[in-house]
Image (cartoon, rainbow, N blue to C red):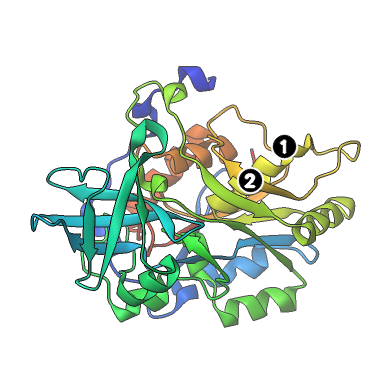
Amino acid sequence: MTTTEFALSDFDYALPPQLIAQHPLPERSGARLLDGSAALPLDRAVRDLPALLAPGDLLVLNDTRVIKARLLGEKPTGGAVEALVERVLPGREVLAHLRASKAPRPGTTVRFAGAFDARVLGRAGPDEALFHLRFPAEPLRLLQQHGHVPLPPYITHPDTADDEARYQTVFAARDGAVAAPTASLHFDAALLAALDARGVQRTTITLHVGAGTFQPVRTERVADHRMHSEWFEVGAAAADAIAAVHARGGRVVAVGTTVLRALESAALRSGFDGEAARPFTACTGETDLFITPGFRFRVVDRLFTNFHLPRSTLLMLASAFAGHEHVMALYRHAVEARYRFFSYGDAMWLARR
């Protein structure tokens, strides 16, 4: 079946609400791991990951850092406003999603957290879905002081200090994400040490996860969906590490869909097709790559990922990677076996079809 033949309903599954994890486990690496690399599912633990890898394999991680991107405020009329900062721009400006009973007009001043005023400059982005705001000081500093952890909409409790620590990877280094690269939340010092002892190599890329990761697909024909754009960087060190692992016959393992999208985006831009004739090179820019069944993967051999929402672009990506029927069967198994779902939930291990 080609991409154009897939309908949105092909990526649906029934999920009991009680399986949506609302809080992280006490230990990051204490989650379950559904091994879907063979024909039949195998129930494992995240701590088993080193045994699934070989010495010389390359694990690629996303080092983005989640910013406290959610702000609560009010318009001059007293009406409530909720902002989710999507991107920080030069000149103390940001692009943000705004929720209000009536959209504020350009020139309006919104007071956030009872502490500072932001001026609405206008609308921006595809379909003008974003608002262009100017802050009175450096946005990242104001967000750190007055913002809230941008927990996804299916987590129903207000953010806490525990969320501030746990909705962040242990190797987060570069500010800019408004959602965590959730597969990486399972990694802690003990797991990283076990991977080192196994001889598994590591490198990092950056993809600043945008709020569009939760954007629902509204077109019944999958091919008609327009993907959101996110900034990414695959640096020279990561490109060299990938070239080296290919040269020695090892495997490239993407930790999360964000890493997979960044690597495959870089491959497409450099013309890399898995052969030495066109080398994989460093790349920086925007990606709106929409990976659906039929996509030809050029870089990634294995995928470590969390469970994704029904009808989501991330579920489509997983289906493209490991096969649609196989992945949907794995999800049915996960529901029957009472796995924990989504950001604070369990993980799965997939082999490229």
Q: In front here: 179 or 292?
A: 179
Please state which amino acid type lies under the numbered disc 1: Arg
**Residue type, numbered disc 2:** Gly
Tell me the residue that label 2 is attached to: 285
Q: Mark 1, residues whose alpha carbon is within 10 Å: few (<14), some, or many (≥20)? A: some
Q: In this view, does 244 lie to the left or right of 283?
A: right
Question: Label 2 crowding class (10 Å Cα cut-off): few <14, some 14-19, many 20+?
Answer: some
The tag on residue 290 is none
Q: In this view, does 216 lie above or below 55?
A: above
Against 12, residue 205 (above or below) is: below
Identify the element where label 2 is drawn: strand
Residue at numbered disc 1 = 269
Q: Earlier in the sequence, mark 1 or mark 2?
A: 1
Residue occupying image coordinates x 60% and y 51%: 232
- Residue 68 percent location from the top left of the image: 37, 68
Measured Cα–Cα span from mark 1 to mark 2: 10 Å
